[in-house]
């Protein structure tokens, strides 16, 4: 997707953390271990990001925020694109909650490199993008988007990156609406609550994408994005397929075993994204009411 020419995005919405390193390039045990399988990829990517998380011990982080940027910069720069995408998501979801007369709370969003501390424990680049329910934070190492292409075969493109962000934002929606609390996220399998949580987040991402070209930036009075092209939509679907459980298992050299799934197949992830994209309602995204996924 392309941000509309002349758009302006205020700085400060996305926080940056640089230079944090975690021993061994992995994540700390404890609370974070309990939700590792609910993260976007569902796998530990440290073998392909060797050294990305740093070596022995934790180093001092440098904190800041993403600065003001223009639509032109958002179309070219990943960190600006993340900030602009989050602001588009904010505007979209506050509208959905206003329509339902429910209270909306924005998530915190962090762009980090190396490692960082979270409300779920210590995390590293090797964990991929994730949402932490205790601190209501979305954590993104933007190098993951290169990995989507090189390791998992996604076609890339801006909408593919925005899909990842929108998926994690969808987990925030699930958290503040009680879905995560009600779901039994301890199990696995093609029909498990774990899979239903992830597919609903995909559907929520599709809801945003389907409305992004008509969502108005309250600061400028113009829409955030130009209409999605077929090629851009194909990029988002390629990203969804790349992180399907069956595809990850195949890429890892193993057999496809639906009993171990926590995120859903490539076909399911694409289909539920498109359900949100075409239907555009939370009711259509109720994966827990679906007889079949």
Image (cartoon, helix red, strand yellow):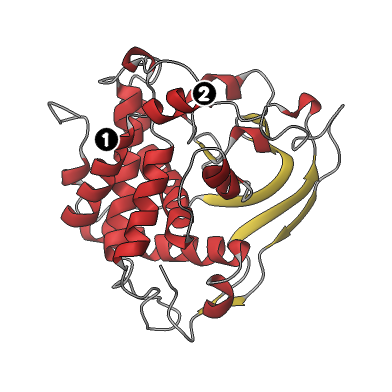
- State the SS at label 1: helix
Q: Earlier in the sequence, mark 1 or mark 2?
A: 2
Task: Please state the horizontal and vertical placement of residue 112, each as a whole percent of the image.
Answer: 68, 48
- Residue at the location (24% across, 49% down)? 274
- State the SS at label 2: loop
Task: Give neighbour class at mark 1: few <14, some 14-19, many 20+ (Cα, 10 Å).
Answer: many
- Residue at the location (42% across, 65% down)? 88
- Residue at the location (55% across, 41% down)? 129
Task: Please tell me whether residue 220 is drawn above or below residue 17 in the rendered image.
Answer: below
Task: Please tell me whether residue 82 is drawn above or below residue 155 in the rendered image.
Answer: below
Q: Is 161 positioned to the left or the right of 286 in the image? A: right
Q: Quadrant of the C terminus?
A: top left
Q: Nearer the viewer, residue 57 or 48?
A: 48
Task: Please state the horizontal and vertical placement of residue 98, each as a whole percent of the image.
Answer: 27, 61
Q: Is 18 positioned to the left or the right of 167 in the image? A: right
Task: Please state the horizontal and vertical placement of residue 280, each as a whole percent of the image.
Answer: 20, 55
Task: Please tell me whether residue 152 is drawn above or below residue 84 in the rendered image.
Answer: above
Q: Does the residue at mark 1 contact the one at mark 2 (Cβ under 8 Å)? A: no
Residue 138 shows in the view: no
Q: Nearer the viewer, residue 174 or 240?
A: 240
What is the total number of numbered labels drawn onto the structure image?
A: 2
- Residue at the location (58% across, 20% down)? 33
**Residue at the extreme left:** 291
Residue 216 shows in the view: yes
Task: Give neighbour class at mark 2: few <14, some 14-19, many 20+ (Cα, 10 Å).
Answer: few
**Residue at the extreme bottom:** 6
Residue tagged 2? 252
Q: Quadrant of the N terminus?
A: bottom left
Residue tagged 1? 268
Residue 128: image quadrant is top right
Q: Nearer the viewer, residue 69 or 178?
A: 69
Task: Please state the horizontal and vertical placement of residue 116, each as a whole percent of the image.
Answer: 71, 39
């Amino acid at each position: 997707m392309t941000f509309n020419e002349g758009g302006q995005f205020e700085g400060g919405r996305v926080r940056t953390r640089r230079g944090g390193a975690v021993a061994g390039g992995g994540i700390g045990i404890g609370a974070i271990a309990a939700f590792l399988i609910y993260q976007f990829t569902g796998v530990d990517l440290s073998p392909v990001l060797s050294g990305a998380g740093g070596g022995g011990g934790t180093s001092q982080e440098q904190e800041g925020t993403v600065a003001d940027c223009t639509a032109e910069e958002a179309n070219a720069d990943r960190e600006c694109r993340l900030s602009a995408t989050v602001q588009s998501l904010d505007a979209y979801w506050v509208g959905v909650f206003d329509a339902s007369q429910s209270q909306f709370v924005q998530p915190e969003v962090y762009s980090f490199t190396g490692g960082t501390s979270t409300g779920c424990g210590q995390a590293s680049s090797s964990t991929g993008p994730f949402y932490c329910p205790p601190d209501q934070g979305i954590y993104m190492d933007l190098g993951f988007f290169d990995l989507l292409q090189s390791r998992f075969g996604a076609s890339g493109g801006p909408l593919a990156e925005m899909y990842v962000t929108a998926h994690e934002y969808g987990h925030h929606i699930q958290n503040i609406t009680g879905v995560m609390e009600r779901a039994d996220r301890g199990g696995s399998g093609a029909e498990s609550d774990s899979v239903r949580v992830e597919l609903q987040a995909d559907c929520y991402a599709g809801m945003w994408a389907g409305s992004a070209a008509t969502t108005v930036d309250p600061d400028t009075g113009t829409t955030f994005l130009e209409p999605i092209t077929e090629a851009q939509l194909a990029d988002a679907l390629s990203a969804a397929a790349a992180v399907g459980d069956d595809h990850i298992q195949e890429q890892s050299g193993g057999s496809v075993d639906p009993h171990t799934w926590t995120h859903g197949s490539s076909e399911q992830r694409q289909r539920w994204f498109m359900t949100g994209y075409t239907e555009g309602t939370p009711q259509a995204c109720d994966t827990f009411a679906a007889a079949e996924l």
